[in-house]
Amino acid sequence: MIPQLATVRYRRPDGRPLRLYIPILPVLLVLAPLLLPAGLVACVIFRVDPVGALRGAGRLLWALPGTRFEIEDGRTAFLVSVR
Amino acid sequence: MNEQRRQILEMLAEGKITADEAERLINALERERLDSAPGAAPRSKPRPRYLRVVMAAADGTGGDGASRLNIRVPIQLLRAGVRLTSLIPPQALTRINAELDKSGVPIDLAQLKPQHLDDLIEHLDELTVDVDDADTKLQVFCE
């Protein structure tokens, strides 16, 4: 399943929260004209098979839903969640 | 001999499928028969989908609160990450091996195939790590 939404939450030490909701697919589509050539150049430089790299990146992206990273230290907290 | 098995053997005799394919098909039929048999043994427990790391630490420093860590990583993500190792170019592996050797870790990464790492991830479901300290509790497990 392709990830749909990434949520980033950050609570600053003074208690003020910051929330970011990132729709992954639209962001990827917008950034595709930059990401694809950059990836291709990187593959050529590092002599990596571009098709394999694309497949690997796709697999990583597809496996992302359900990932959650949450860290809390005193009044500071940081959360990244992908669904 | 049931009808499906006979069809598979006929396809093999006619050369439509190879012996390996016939064996796979017959095995699949066997599995299907065992699964659908009445009174069949219940299926084993569901495969875990996530690797969890949970840590809770009391505030032992006189600071302003306790620390907590909660990480949930899909096993599928670990598997996808492991498969990326097959993209490492051979010249990079040679350099890594040389550096590891220089540091006193004589491990040949070229011998580490994605299949081996895949097997490792496959058996992660049996992993449980519990660390209990006076102020800190750490758990690593699959769910």
Image (cartoon, coloured by chain):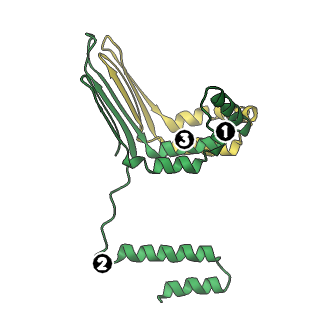
Q: Residues under labels 1 and 2: Cα distance?
A: 49 Å
Residue at image mark 2 = B38
Residue B68 is situated, as x and y percent measured from the top left of the image, at 31, 25
User: Mark 1 and mark 3 in contact (Cβ < 8 Å)?
Assistant: no
> Residue B34 location in percent, x, y?
38, 75
Q: Amino acid at mark 1?
A: Ile
* Residues at discs 3 and 2 in contact (Cβ within 8 Å): no
Find disc 1 in the rendering and name its residue.
B88
Residue under numbered circle 3:
B81
Question: Quadrant of the rendered structure where residue B93 is?
Answer: top right
Q: Colour of chain A?
A: yellow
Inter-mark Cα distance, 3 to 1: 12 Å
Q: Colour of chain B?
A: green
* CA separation in Å, label 3 and label 2: 41 Å
Residue drawn at 47 percent across, 47 percent down: B121
On screen, residue A47 versus residue A61, left or right, reads: right
The answer to whether residue A12 is above or below residue B40 is above
Graded by Cα atoms within 10 Å as few (under 14), some (14 to 19) or many (20 or more), the crowding at tag 1 reads: some
Q: Compared to B29, does B43 lie above or below? A: above
